[in-house]
Image (cartoon, rainbow, N blue to C red):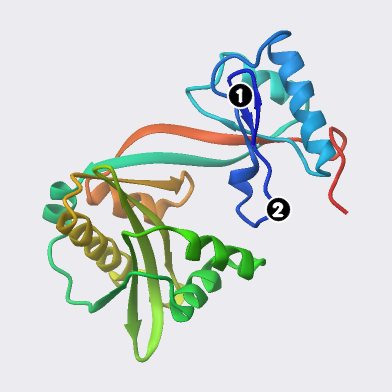
């Protein structure tokens, strides 16, 4: 990570592309937004990567339209949501499904998650999960000997974050995701965390319905701006 005024220029070679974006929170320093964008583009060009900005309410006013004017594409709109653990437990209730929780990622959990996400670079993703410090919970639902739904949670400083929620297409609409979320909420409560948070793609209607029924309210929305091929050097 390289600082640029109050901005952070982040680059990663791993598959988690969001971790390689500019956190443009505050003032980029002398020269203002135009120079800040140019320096960010030079930084990513040096890594043979496209410049990518995370655009949130914390960004300076005018950054988003300025990037749009430079040809940056608007991608991956996301909703950040939170809920009290007690509310989630009350709303979801008990589940008839058997949900297994592990403290570390397992091969079967990872295969199910990857089957839904369809991402490459599995070794890098696996290594990233293996580096996470506990307390963590990896939830999975098995039907007919096959893992059909997964999710994971990380507890820290009074909050539990929910990540990696994924359900195989053939198991959707059967309450499996609800069972995973309920199990993670119980795990969060057992560890004394009072609140949960998660991020969901704004276009994922089934997931949004589940989280709204569970009592998750939106804190803010954000998206990304990605440079087109003509703005910076491309990866080979």
Q: Are marks 2 and 1 in contact (CB under 8 Å)?
A: no
What residue is rendered at 23% in x and 50% in y?
A: 213
Give the percent coordinates (x, y) of residue 100. Answer: 28, 76
Q: 82 or 129: which is nearer to us? A: 129
- Figure quadrant of the N terminus: top right
Q: Indicate which disc residue 7 carries.
A: 1
What residue is rendered at 44% in x and 77% in y?
A: 106
Alpha carbon separation for disc pair 2 and 1: 20 Å
Q: 125 or 79: which is nearer to us? A: 125
Give the percent coordinates (x, y) of residue 38. Answer: 79, 22
Please identify the quarter of the rendering in which residue 231 is found.
top right
What residue is rendered at 49% in x and 22% in y?
A: 58
Give the percent coordinates (x, y) of residue 135. Answer: 31, 59
Nearer-N-terminus badge (2/1): 1
Left or right position of 193 against 90: right
List the residue tagged with mark 2. Answer: 13
């Amino acid at each position: 990570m390289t600082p640029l005024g109050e901005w952070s220029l982040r680059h990663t070679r791993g598959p988690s592309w969001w971790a390689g974006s500019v956190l443009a929170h505050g003032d980029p320093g002398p020269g203002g937004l135009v120079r800040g964008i140019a320096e960010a583009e030079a930084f990513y060009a040096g890594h043979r990567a496209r410049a990518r900005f995370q655009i949130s309410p914390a960004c300076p006013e005018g950054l988003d339209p300025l990037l749009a004017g430079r040809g940056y594409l608007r991608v991956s709109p996301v909703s950040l949501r939170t809920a009290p653990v007690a509310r989630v437990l009350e709303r979801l209730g008990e589940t008839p499904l058997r949900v297994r929780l592990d403290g570390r990622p397992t091969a079967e959990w990872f295969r199910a998650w990857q089957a839904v996400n369809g991402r490459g670079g599995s070794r890098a993703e696996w290594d990233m999960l293996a580096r996470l410090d506990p307390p963590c919970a990896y939830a999975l639902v098995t039907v007919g000997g096959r893992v059909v739904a997964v999710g994971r949670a990380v507890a820290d400083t009074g909050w539990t974050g929910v990540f990696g929620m994924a359900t195989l297409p053939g198991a959707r609409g059967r309450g499996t995701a609800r069972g995973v979320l309920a199990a993670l909420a119980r795990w969060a409560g057992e560890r004394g965390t009072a609140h949960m948070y998660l991020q969901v793609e704004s276009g994922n209607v089934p997931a949004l319905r589940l989280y709204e029924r569970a009592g998750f309210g939106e804190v803010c929305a954000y998206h990304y701006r990605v440079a087109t091929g003509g703005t910076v050097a491309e990866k080979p």
